Image (cartoon, rainbow, N blue to C red):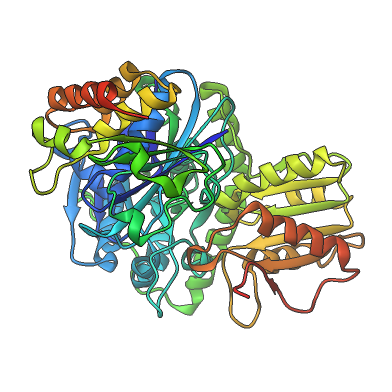
Amino acid sequence: MKKIMVGNHAVSWGVMLSRAEVISAYPITPQTTIVEELSVLCADGRLKAKFIPVESEHSAMACCVGAAAAGVRTFTATSGQGLALMHEMLHWASGARLPIVMATVNRALGSPWNIWGEQTDSLSQRDTGWLQLYCESNQEVLDTVIQAFKIAEEISLPVMLNLDAFFLSHTAEPVEIPEQSLVDDFLPPYQPEFRLDPKNPHSFGCMTPPEYYMEFRYKIQQSMLQGKAVAQQVDDAFGRVFGRKYGLIEPYRCEGADLILITSGAIASTARVVVDNLREKGRKVGMVKVRLFRPFPKDELLEILRQVEKVAVVDRNVSFGVGGIFAHEMRAALCNEKVRPAIFSYIAGLGGRDVTPPVLNDVIYQTYKRQEPEAQSVWVGMRS
Amino acid sequence: MIEIRIHGRGGQGAVIASEVLASAFFQEGKFVQAFPAFGVERRGAPVTAFTRVDDQPIRIRNFIYEPDHIIVLDPTLIESTQVDSGLKENGWIIINTDRPPKNFPHFSRFRVATVDANRIAVEYKLGSPTAPIVNTAILGAFSRITGMVSMDSVIEAMKEFVPSNKAGNAAAIKEAYERAKA
């Protein structure tokens, strides 16, 4: 069955199909309609979950930590400032090895106040031990929620899926709703090895001295690296059951390309149109969408990019003092390769500014024109 | 691809109109996309929403700057905003007003159609007499004037998105369909 659905409701329906058992959240634009719809689904019985409204995002994540430790499937959603407030608990969730799934509707951070799209909120959580996936369409959003629970429970780490504020969250388009019975087979009930149980008491997360702490960290790093293979297996298995798969990265028309555009989220969708138009004019331009950001899919990217001379990375985010964050990661991933493309870094679309085909054409034009990348990220689509 | 821009005021249902319209086209086998120009919406403030329709999946995800057609839910917006901005020549401007199309001579580069959706909405008790919800009625007029999507599809789509008084909304769509003037 296909329904016309906004991205936020695609999240909610993915959570319903995944049979989450505890949802705790605090409303914040543009995420609010995710949990609004979930509260409706809980209230009318379509989703048999405990919905716990709380007084802040910090408490929402604390609630998820408690519930997940008790051994149930948990979900929350937030945006921008809400995610920032949650930061402390994000570390706790991954440290305690809890497979919580969270949807982040990417929103710019204040000051100045802004409710529109930008990925700096989630990318500034990149060191918290959460896997991060970035989605391009409402269908991918719904499917990724189901995949996220499966990945998280497989490697005992939390997963954050990200969607662009408004350009996905509030955009309605057709979404295929998977059969519940197929989702049930794909994602059986969560059965953790350890859980809080008064009949079988254990301590979790207690004081761990220097003699032990480091090994806990090492195990998280190992699991995170393993997360890449698991995410790939889960996506492959999902494809076999539901007929749709997305990859960790997705190359688009990269055959014989001399320039490859790299981007993520809703911009990747518009970039396909730009690549199609340029290919029609005989330009050898391709695009790679980065879907998995943590762990960073270095080898997969390298395989595509090795052949090409120039790579233009479009970032809807900024790390002040460095520049575009995807570009920064790309450079770090490629630095030990003998043959590697030049990485051209562009910043676009901050605070919800529209990233149009002319903006992306400008990025491609500038990249062709320049011999060498500028020392700093180039900001495009600026007011003149 | 057909791109439609809807101008309304907070409370008139412009965003839902964009979704109902998308859903109506979807029922006729088209690929669709509907979204609002996201602002800090509040009752009475200008609101813009968009619908895209195509025969293939829609990949573009940015605002519509050069629409094929325009729907205006509140005629007072014509005085305060340039509703025809970027509109393609010969595009339709479908206006909720009790005035006839010839009363809008400044839109001579385009095709103008009108329907008194306020009166129709009030008659079928959609919203209140002071703040009628005109979004469904105007889509009846859109169906009639452009012939791009059937009235039955609009009515079916409405049922998905409108929570109450579906009979009243269906009747309003039908009446606006019959009374739209070009």
In the rendered image of this protein, does residue A172 appear above or below residue A80?
A: above
Pick the front one: A303 or A313: A313
Which residue in the rendered view is the most extreme toward the bottom? A321
**Residue A85 coordinates in the image, percent (x, y):** 34, 72
| Coordinates of residue A55 in the picture (x, y in percent) | 18, 66
Q: From what the image shows, is residue A286 above or below residue A184?
A: below
- Rendering coords of residue B97 (x, y %): 25, 41
Q: Please state, as top left, top right, bottom left or bottom right, where the C terminus of chain A lies in the image.
A: bottom right
Viewport quadrant of the N terminus of chain A: top left
Q: Using the rendered image of the protein, determine whether residue A157 is visible from the camera's viewpoint.
A: no
Q: Residue at x 73, y 55 (%)?
A: A361
In this orientation, which residue lies closer to the viewer: B180 or A268? B180
How far across and down, in percent of the image, does residue A205 sit? 35, 66
Kindly identify the residue that appears in the image at 10 percent across and 36 percent down: B122
Count of numbered marks: 0
Q: Quadrant of residue A224?
A: bottom right
The residue at 21%/32% (across/down) is B162
Q: Quadrant of residue A38?
A: top left
Up-down relation of residue A288 to residue A313 (above or below) = above
Please say whether residue B179 is visible from this viewpoint: yes
Q: Residue A264, relative to residue A373: is it above or below? A: above
